């Protein structure tokens, strides 16, 4: 596998070098300013899309404000040149930083709303930017726009071709930087908050903070692209950054394929070239015939290989043939341009939901190259991967809760509950369905703020603190309904838990400083060790959503252990597990306790609880009705009464 991935890496590198060389040589081979400008625009749009993909593809947010950000970048450069004759090396960083600042502003609504509401708010943001640019004519020259020349570098004024090369270099730089960000702990944090915001927070990755980071970084790329666009067009006016452009950007990410740099490049090429294609009926005829043949062949192959049924393929085949027929029937495209554009978009978005890159990956059975184990990395021994819990404060109780009340309207899910958890023990929390166990977990991890009561952990109050803060202070958890980051591999899931071990910043990530390399290698080693600890060593590269249910539960435990917790909360870890899996689980929980980590265990399997727990607390209708050693609790009248009104569960 290692050899194969090395080979893949080399072939990717060769392809990338060939691609960059082709881009650099293009203006020499084809000395036509129109085509040079077209390719330049594609690269500039690709830079916007690299950034937009962070927000849309990775964090799963919608943004219809990116044309506005693009405009801000263009105007930052335009105004600096027009008013202060600022040089290129000033306008580029200023445009990036200025637009990144507005990215934080755009992130604010994303912290409160999502889905269609977020789409509306970001759309309003873009519109307001456009109106402001229009109205602030003392700075922006209003609807008249600003004219500017190609920039100078080292005292030499760049011509069309030289500026094209500058764009190539900056696009490649942007691509490398965005790729590195997305492959780093930052990228994993972005992806995690799409997978499960609540689990992200409980892994110490603050959803608030990383949403803002994603928008800020994304906006920085839009700023760079806007700045280059201003010089490329040599004229900027508010109308360029309109609703149509923002929708096109979003469509380009979806059509090209989210979570893919090649997808962004493809998407940019489509939105630049498609309108041109639709201007020329002869060219459109050729392309539509080629498309129809391609669709026909793909459909035939897919049906033969039993990857699709004739019924599934009927609409794409008929649609593409109809498009080709229409192309020959039409004399001119003028009246039909927009309609055909819309139909093609609809078709791609409807039929290729993972975009063109996703479709090709699926057709050729290509896997995302997600697991890159550095050659120097060896897994930490499974038992060493679990950090021995530090005995902070040294008190006998690791957690103390008193008088906890959690009220939902009229319902008291927890009613005056006291809980005292001794360090280094396994503490069972049991009770019938709906008795408040999960609510207690949620209160202890900051998901709910208790209506009343006090909770202290390692000498500090937990009440009112955020989930990520509580997680970082040493409380890790698993969830009753498994909350993994589904599209990420097992290894990446655990790496998210190790997010707290990174001190590297954006610069370290972009440049791959020794600090980042050290931290990254160490995290891979630890993650491998933790996966081996829970017996998932062979599933390292498997996407979490593809793991069997029992393995998913074990993966959640490995991820929680990555936080180096003092206290681990396990919410029904044995639910849905087979008998051998439960045996394995019991052994793992015992090993965790042996590392000095205190465990609170919610479980319906009484044999698991009784065989492992040092102390058991019983909840019923939100109140604690019994507490003590397992055997004593099992024999308690009130407990027997609570469970099925007389017979204890087994
Ligand atoms: N966010 C919420 N809003 C309203 N009611 C809630 C909320 N969360 C929990 N509850 C209610 O609080 C009570 C306790 O629920 P909880 O999930 O804590 O029980 P549980 O003991 O974990 O049950 P189970 O074993 O079925 O998971 C239930 O009546 C539940 O409907």
Image (cartoon, rainbow, N blue to C red):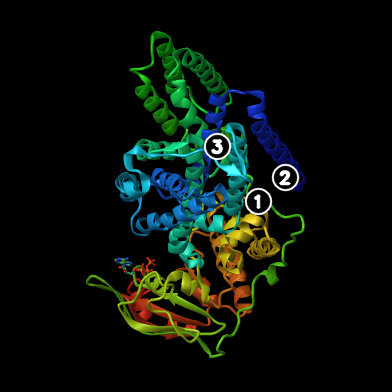
Circle 1/circle 2 CB separation < 8 Å: yes
Residue 43 circle label: 3
Whether residue 606 is visible to the viewer of this picture, yes or no, is: no
Q: Position of residue 638 (x, y in %)?
A: 35, 82
The residue at the point 43 percent across, 20 percent down is: 278
Disc 1: residue Cβ within 8 A of ligand 1's nearest atom = no
Residue at the far bottom: name it. 395
Q: Quadrant of residue 263?
A: top right
User: Nearer the N terminus, badge 3 or badge 2?
Assistant: 2
Q: Is residue 590 above or below residue 486?
A: below
Q: Which residue is mark 2?
A: 5
Q: Position of residue 574 (x, y in %)?
A: 51, 64
Q: Label 3 to label 2, Cα distance in Å?
A: 29 Å
Give the secondary structure at mark 2: helix
Circle 3/circle 1 CB separation < 8 Å: no
Q: Which residue is mark 1?
A: 371
Give the secondary structure at mark 1: loop
Q: Quadrant of residue 520?
A: bottom right
Whether residue 467 is visible to the viewer of this picture, yes or no, is: yes
Looking at the picture, tell me which residue is in the foreground, 549 or 24.
Answer: 24
Looking at the picture, tell me which residue is in the foreground, 484 or 254.
Answer: 254
Q: Is residue 313 above or below residue 44?
A: above
Category of crowding for the residue at label 3, using alpha-carbon neighbours closer than 10 angstroms: few (below 14), some (14–19), many (at least 20):
many
Looking at the picture, tell me which residue is in the foreground, 389 or 69.
Answer: 69
The residue at the point 43 percent across, 33 percent down is: 349
Circle 3/circle 2 CB separation < 8 Å: no
Q: Label 1 to label 2, Cα distance in Å?
A: 9 Å
Looking at the picture, tell me which residue is in the foreground, 646 or 281.
Answer: 281
Foreground tag (3 vs 1): 3
């Amino acid at each position: 596998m290692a050899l194969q991935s090395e080979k893949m890496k080399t072939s990717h590198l060769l392809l990338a070098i060939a691609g960059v060389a082709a881009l650099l040589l293009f203006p020499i081979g084809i000395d036509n300013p129109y085509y040079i400008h077209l390719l330049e625009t594609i690269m500039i749009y690709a830079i916007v899309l690299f950034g937009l993909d962070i927000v849309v593809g990775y964090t799963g947010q919608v943004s219809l404000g990116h044309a506005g950000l693009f405009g801000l970048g263009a105007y930052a450069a335009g105004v600096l040149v027009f008013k202060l004759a600022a040089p290129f090396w000033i306008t580029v960083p200023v445009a990036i930083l200025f637009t990144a600042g507005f990215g934080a502003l755009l992130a604010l609504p994303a912290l409160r709303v999502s889905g269609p509401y977020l789409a509306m708010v970001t759309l309003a943001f873009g519109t307001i930017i456009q109106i402001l640019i229009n109205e602030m004519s003392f700075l922006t020259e209003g609807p008249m726009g600003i004219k500017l020349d190609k920039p100078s570098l080292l005292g030499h004024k760049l011509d069309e071709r030289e500026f094209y090369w500058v764009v190539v270099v900056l696009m490649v730089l942007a691509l490398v930087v965005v790729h590195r960000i997305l492959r780093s702990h930052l990228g994993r944090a972005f992806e995690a908050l799409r997978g499960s915001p609540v689990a992200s927070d409980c892994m110490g990755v603050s959803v608030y903070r990383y949403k803002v980071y994603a928008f800020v970084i994304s906006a920085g790329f839009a700023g760079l692209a806007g700045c280059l666009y201003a010089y490329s067009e040599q004229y900027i006016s508010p109308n360029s950054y309109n609703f149509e452009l923002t929708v096109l950007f979003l469509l380009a990410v979806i059509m090209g394929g989210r979570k893919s740099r090649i997808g962004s490049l493809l998407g940019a090429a489509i939105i630049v070239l498609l309108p041109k294609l639709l201007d020329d009926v002869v060219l459109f005829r050729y392309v539509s015939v080629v498309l129809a043949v391609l669709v026909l062949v793909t459909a035939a192959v897919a049906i033969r290989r039993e990857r699709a049924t004739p019924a599934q393929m009927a609409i794409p085949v008929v649609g593409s043939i109809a498009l080709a027929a229409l192309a020959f029937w039409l004399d001119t495209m003028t009246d039909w341009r927009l309609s055909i554009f819309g139909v093609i978009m609809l078709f791609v978005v409807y039929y290729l939901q993972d975009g063109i890159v996703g479709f090709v990956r699926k057709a050729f059975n290509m896997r995302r190259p997600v697991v890159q184990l550095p050659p120097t990395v060896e897994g930490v021994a499974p038992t060493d991967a679990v950090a021995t819990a530090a005995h902070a404060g040294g008190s006998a109780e690791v957690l103390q809760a008193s008088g906890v009340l959690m009220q939902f309207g009229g319902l008291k899910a927890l009613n005056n509950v006291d809980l005292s958890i001794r360090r280094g023990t396994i503490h069972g929390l049991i009770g019938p369905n709906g008795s408040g166990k999960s609510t207690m977990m949620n209160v202890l991890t900051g998901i709910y703020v208790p209506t009343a009561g006090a909770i202290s952990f390692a000498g500090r109050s937990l009440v009112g603190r955020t989930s990520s803060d509580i997680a970082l202070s040493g409380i890790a958890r698993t969830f009753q309904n498994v909350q993994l980051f589904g599209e990420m591999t097992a290894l990446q899931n655990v790496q998210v838990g190790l997010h707290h071990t990174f001190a590297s910043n954006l610069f370290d990530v972009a440049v791959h400083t020794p600090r980042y390399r050290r931290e990254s290698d160490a995290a891979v080693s630890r993650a491998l060790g933790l996966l081996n600890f829970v017996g998932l060593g062979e599933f390292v590269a498997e996407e979490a959503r593809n793991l069997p249910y029992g393995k998913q539960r074990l993966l959640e435990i490995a991820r929680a252990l990555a936080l180096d917790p003092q206290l681990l909360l396990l919410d029904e870890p044995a639910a849905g597990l087979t008998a051998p899996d439960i045996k394995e689980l019991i052994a793992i929980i015992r090993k965790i306790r042996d590392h000095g980590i205190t465990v609170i265990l919610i479980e319906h399997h009484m044999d698991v609880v009784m065989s492992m727990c040092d102390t058991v607390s019983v909840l019923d209708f939100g109140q604690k009705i019994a507490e003590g050693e397992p055997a004593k609790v099992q024999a308690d009248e009130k407990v027997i009464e609570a469970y099925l009104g007389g017979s204890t569960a087994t």
